[in-house]
Image: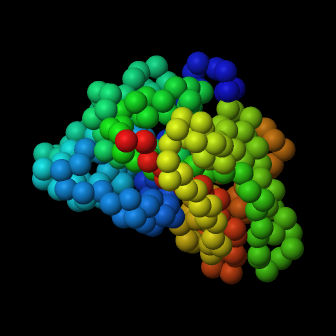
Amino acid sequence: MTATAPTQRYQFRNSPHQLHPLQEMLDPVTLDDLTRLGVNPGHTALDVGAGAGSIAQHLCELVGRTGKVIAVDIDTSMLNPTGVLDVYQRDLRTQPLPVEPGTIDIATARCVLEHLPNRHLLLHQMINALRPGGHLVLGEIVYAPVSAHAPADGDNELITRVVHTILDVLAGRGVDLHWGDKVPSVLLANGFEQVHTRWVAETCAGGSAGCRLYADNATQLRDRLIAEDLSHDELDRFAELMVDPAVLVRGYQFASTTARKPR
């Protein structure tokens, strides 16, 4: 897929193997941002690309029974509507967000916009949906060099090669791995205030959430990785290393940006 292809889609399936490690890694950052911004009972929240629903569920707890959370995803099979949570299935490449302008107090999107060719249009929909004084919480995986520490030098080189090839394959298929770095400038250009970004990357041992995520990404992209001159034996060895507690890898770098719409 290319950045201009109308069929561009999210590269990974909504599955527990993909989403649960992602949540385990990134939820602490996103939840800390939500707490800092002060989501209150009675607020209306929007979660774009809600996935398995961990952030939507936390938003439900914050807005309480008098609030509302709107969760949107192309695959809603892992989302369960409640009295507070409304769930909408939408293909955001072609369908607009199911919200009215100026009705949202806080809007979140994590590891979504960088995958979509219409990311700027979708971001502007989120901006228009916000009330004056409302907040955005936007998070993306961004490109960063990978380092690995394994008992054998050859394994270090293999881990680094596989992870860099995953990133190259994603970039080659239209994923903007620099989008998270661009977000602050885009929001400032739209007049947002209190724009703040932090970049987070931590080491992860074999068997941890970060390594399980690497392993699942390699599995889902296996055909593409083979086409990039990795062998089946190398990918099988990579899978073994990702569950080896003697292995330590620098995890994906995550950029989380918060900002407030002017009142």
Residue 236 coordinates in the image, percent (x, y): 70, 58
Q: Quarter of the image holding residue 204?
A: bottom right
Residue 170 in view (yes/no): no
163, 235: nearer the viewer: 163
Residue 221 coordinates in the image, percent (x, y): 65, 43
Residue 116 coordinates in the image, percent (x, y): 56, 31
Compared to 84, does 9 lie above or below?
A: above
Residue 154 coordinates in the image, percent (x, y): 86, 69
Relative placement, left or right, of 195 versus 96 is right
Relative placement, left or right, of 103 versus 233 is left
Q: Residue at 36% across / 33% down in the picture?
A: 129
Compared to 154, does 259 lie above or below?
A: above
Q: Quarter of the image holding residue 41?
A: bottom left
Compared to 261, does 31 lie above or below?
A: below
Q: Quarter of the image holding residue 235?
A: bottom right
Compared to 179, does 249 lie above or below?
A: below
Report the label total.
Answer: 0
Residue 207 in view (yes/no): yes
Q: Quadrant of the N terminus?
A: top right
Q: Residue at 44% across / 47% down in the picture?
A: 260
Q: Residue at 67% across / 27% down in the picture?
A: 3
Q: Residue furthest front?
A: 263
Q: Quadrant of the C terminus?
A: top left
36, 169: nearer the viewer: 36
Say how the picture is coloured.
Answer: rainbow
Relative placement, left or right, of 48 versus 257 is left
Q: Residue at 48% across / 30% down in the picture?
A: 124
